[in-house]
Amino acid sequence: MVGFGQGFGEVNVGHFYNFVCVSIFFRNFAVRTLVRSTPQNTDIVSKGNELKPRIGLFGRRNAGKSSLVNYLTGQSTAIVSDTPGTTTDPVRKSMEIGGIGPVVLVDTAGIDDQGDLGSQRVEKTIAALAEVDLALLLFTQWGEPEERIEHWCNQHGTPLLPIQTKADLSPQPRHDEALLMTVKDPSLRDTLIAHIRLKLPETAWRATSLLGDIVAAGDTVVLVTPIDSSAPEGRMILPQVQVLRDLMDLHAQALFCQPQELARTLASLRELPRLVVTDSQAFKSVAETVPDAVPLTSFSVVLARQKGLFDEYLRGTQTIGTLRDGDRVLLLESCTHNVTCEDIGRVKLPAALRRATGKDIQCDIIAGNTPLSAHRPPLADYRLVIQCGGCVITRQQVRARLLPALEAGLPVSNYGLALAWCTGIFHRATKIFKQ
Ligand SMILES: Nc1nc2c(ncn2[C@@H]2O[C@H](COP(=O)(O)OP(=O)(O)OP(=O)(O)O)[C@@H](O)[C@H]2O)c(=O)[nH]1
Ligand SMILES: [Mg+2]
C-alpha cells in the first residue's frame, strides 16, 4: 500500500510537472517568436560595467536565488546552502545573453531576513532593487514579502519577472504570471533566458546615440578638450571617447583641439561646424570664441542627457539662482577614484556656486555608494542635490541614486549643468537640446 501510494503520488506529480513544462513550452513559443523578431544587436561586442544592464534576483531566504545564478551562468559562483541567510551582501556576476550582450546578475540577501544584521541586509537588498533594470522575484510561496517587492517595482516602474522556484518539489502554480522553474531541469534555461530577454527594457541594453537627433552624416563637430594638469596621462577621458565614437557611428567628422587652438581650428573650416562640444571647465573661454550662430554645449551636458534625469536637471539647476546665505547643497559623486571628478566636486563646483551666487553656500559631498538615508545631516536640510556625470554607472543607477531626493521633493541638478549655470552659459549649453 505504502509503495503504491508513493508511486501513485510520484506519477501524479510527475505528470503535472510535465504538463506544466509543456504549457511553459507553448507559452514560450510565442516568447521565442517575439524575441527572434527583435532587432539583433550584433555590433555590441563588449561593454564597460557602466553599460551592462543589471538583473537582480530577489526573494525570501532559501528561495533558490543563488542556485539560479549558478544555473544561469553555468558556474558555481554563488554559495548555495539550505541554511537560510547564506547570501549576505549583494553579489554581482557577469554573463552574456544572446541578442543583448553582457549583463550583470545581482544575487541578494533574503527580503525576509530578521534581526539587527538582517534588517541591514534587507536595506542593501532594497538598494540593489533600486538599481536593477529587471527584478526576478523568486518564490515558493506567495505572500507579504513578495507583494512588498511587487508593489515597490510597480511604484518605481521596474519590470518584474515572478519565478516560482523548486517546481520539481512543488509544481502547483501559486501565481498567474509566474514562470515555473527548477534548477534540476537544464532544459528550462532557454525558456528563462527568453523571458528575461522579453522583460528587459531595450533602453537598458541598447546604447542610444548621444547626438543622433542633432548631428547628421557629413556634419563637422569640434570637440574642445584642455590638456591640463587634471587630464590623465596619455589618454582621453571616457565622455570624450564616447562622444567621438558616437560621431563616428553617425558618420560625422570630429575635430579635436585644445581651447587655445580653437580660434585657429574654426578659421581653418570652410563652413561653420554643426556643433562645438567643450570640456565644462573651458566653457567660458570657448563660449567667447564660438560664434553665436554655432550651437555650443559641454561633454557633461551631452552625457547628462543620456544618463540622467535631464528634464529634472534642467528645472533643478535654476534653483541655484535662488540660493541664500547658509543654504546647503549636496554633491553626489558616483566614482571614488577619478581625480578630475574630485577636483570638480570638492574644489571647483563649490567655489563656482559661491562665486556665481555671491552667497555663503555650504557644500557637502558623498562619494561612492553610501546610502543617502544614512547621510547626516538628513536630506531635508538641503536646498539642492547635484549629481556627477555618472560615467561609471548605468542610467538606472543614476535614477536610483537620486530617488530619495526626488521623493523628498528636492530639486536635482548635475555637475555639468550646475557648472554651466555658474559660468553663465547654462542657457547656451542647453539651448540646442530644448529645440
Ligand atoms: N529541489 C530543489 N532544490 C533547490 C532548487 N533551487 C534551490 N534549491 C535548494 O534550496 C536551498 C537554498 O538554495 P539557495 O540557492 O542557497 O537559496 P537562496 O535564495 O540563495 O538563499 P539565501 O542566500 O539564504 O537567501 C539549497 O539547498 C538548494 O540546493 C530547485 O530548483 N529544486
Ligand atoms: Mg543565496
Image (cartoon, helix red, strand yellow):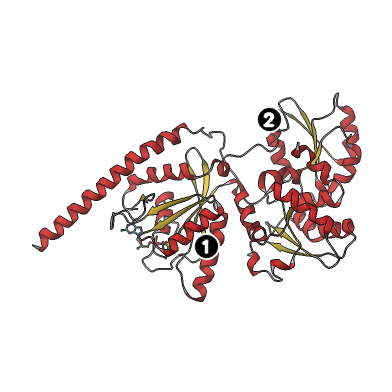
Q: Residue 199 in the image: x percent, y percent?
A: 48, 44
Residue at point 81% right, 51% down?
Answer: 419
**In the rendered image, which residue does mark 2 sit on?**
250
Residue at point 75% right, 48% down?
Answer: 314
Which of the 4 quarters of the picture holds residue 1?
bottom left
Which of the 4 quarters of the picture holds residue 324?
bottom right
**In the rendered image, which residue does mark 1 sit on?**
125
| Badge 2 density bin: few <14, some 14–19, many ≥20, Cα 10 Å | some
* Kind of residue indicated by mark 2: Leu
Image-based side of 367 in relation to 174, left or right: right
User: Vertically, is 335 above or below 292?
Assistant: below
Residue at point 47% right, 39% down?
Answer: 98
Dot 2 lies on which element? loop
Q: Residue 117 in the image: x percent, y percent?
A: 51, 73
User: Vertically, is 96 above or below 266?
Assistant: below
**Could one spot residue 59 in this view of the protein?**
no
Image-based side of 337 in relation to 282, left or right: left
What count of labels does the image hold? 2
* Kind of residue indicated by mark 1: Thr
The image quadrant where one finds ligand 2 is bottom left
Q: Residue 51 in the image: x percent, y percent?
A: 60, 46
